[in-house]
Amino acid sequence: MYATHRQHRTFLPPPEYNPLGPSLEGAPPTELPDGDYDAAVFDNLFPSLTRAAHDPPALAVEARPARGACEVVVFTRDSRSSLGSLPLDHLELLIEVWAERYLELGAMADVQYVFPFENRGVEVGVTLHHPHGQIYAYPFVPPIPAAELAEQRAYLERHGRGLLEWMIESERVHGTRVLYDGPATTAFVPVCARYPYEVWVATRAAIPSVADLDAAGRADLARALKTVLLKFDGLWQRPFPYVMAFHQAPTDGLPHPEAHLHIEFYPPYRMPARLKYLAGSELGAGVFTADTDPDDTAAQLRAVEVRLD
């Protein structure tokens, strides 16, 4: 997706900008909406995808209009907060927001995949520091979810059960990589972790999307998310940077019995003071070389005591 106008997007609001007060002259308009709210959703001011996209250029390769949507989800009006520090009922509200946006965006004619995510911290490129995430509504199923779904589909056809269901069951039996094990949700460091301190949060049943969670499922997912996020911050004793990515069923109008809602966290660190950059093997060959062991990183995270109330 090419969106050259994003070179001029808002970067680090001026020091005099008060995100808890009315907009000031020179402050970025609507980057944090005025008013009294718990959470807010609005169109990204510098989108990579838009409902108005049309007439792609004639190129030697196939080109399509970038028709879709890019939204910002403000988690809270308090710029000093974070997703992990929010009360459980507020996290449940955000899960309802993600569910509502999945249904509305997924119903758009051109949208085939609804992808909520959060980039937290300057280490992963964040330029606006109030707690927020984004939602991209793609006119195609992105490559990583597409490959994942293909593997899940093949496993389901061979074994009659879901690949992620089997994986979660195996992790729960093994036990040492599990960080949270609630009535409906499990959080764990996957045995196949590509990134140091990578964590997956998954529903134990093969629920296709966040919109398919019931009230009990939303409550348990909120507890799992808060547990993981507090462990990240507690392990390093600082706001821990990460990318959070939702993986769920496409909205392409086709059946997806293989889809299984889960959320993946990708922290950027190898060691406490050194960033994990992707190198030739990862970028060029797609082969990840990790200098940490999933069992070791899970043991460090498991050792961090957290309180959810």
Image (cartoon, rainbow, N blue to C red):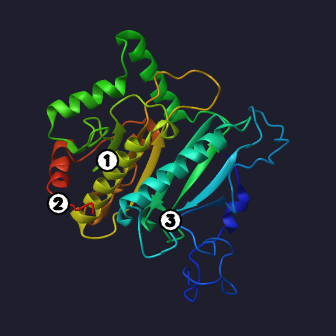
Dot 2: element: loop
Using the numbered discs, state the Cα–Cα distance from disc 2 to disc 3 in whole angstroms.
28 Å
For mark 1, what is the residue?
198
Front of the two marks 2 and 3: 2
Front of the two marks 2 and 1: 2
Dot 1: element: loop
The number of numbered badges drawn on the structure is 3
Quadrant housing the C terminus: bottom left
The outermost residue toward the front is 215
Tell me the residue at 61%/40% (across/down): 103
Find out whether the residues at labels 2 and 1 contact each other: C-beta distance under 8 Å: no
Residue 301 place in picture, x, y as percent: 20, 54
Q: Is residue 99 above or below residue 306?
A: above
Give the residue type that dot 2 points to. Glu
Labels 2 and 1: the sequence-earlier one: 1
Tell me the residue at 50%/71% (across/down): 130
Dot 3: element: loop
Q: Quadrant of residue 167?
A: top left
Q: Is residue 207 above or below residue 66?
A: above
Labels 3 and 1: the sequence-earlier one: 3
Q: Quadrant of residue 254?
A: top right
**Label 2 neighbour load within 10 Å: few <14, some 14-19, many 20+:** few
Labels 2 and 3: the sequence-earlier one: 3
Give the residue type that dot 1 points to. Glu
Image disc number at residue 305: 2
Give the residue type that dot 3 points to. Val
Q: Is residue 99 above or below residue 207?
A: below
Image disc number at residue 126: 3
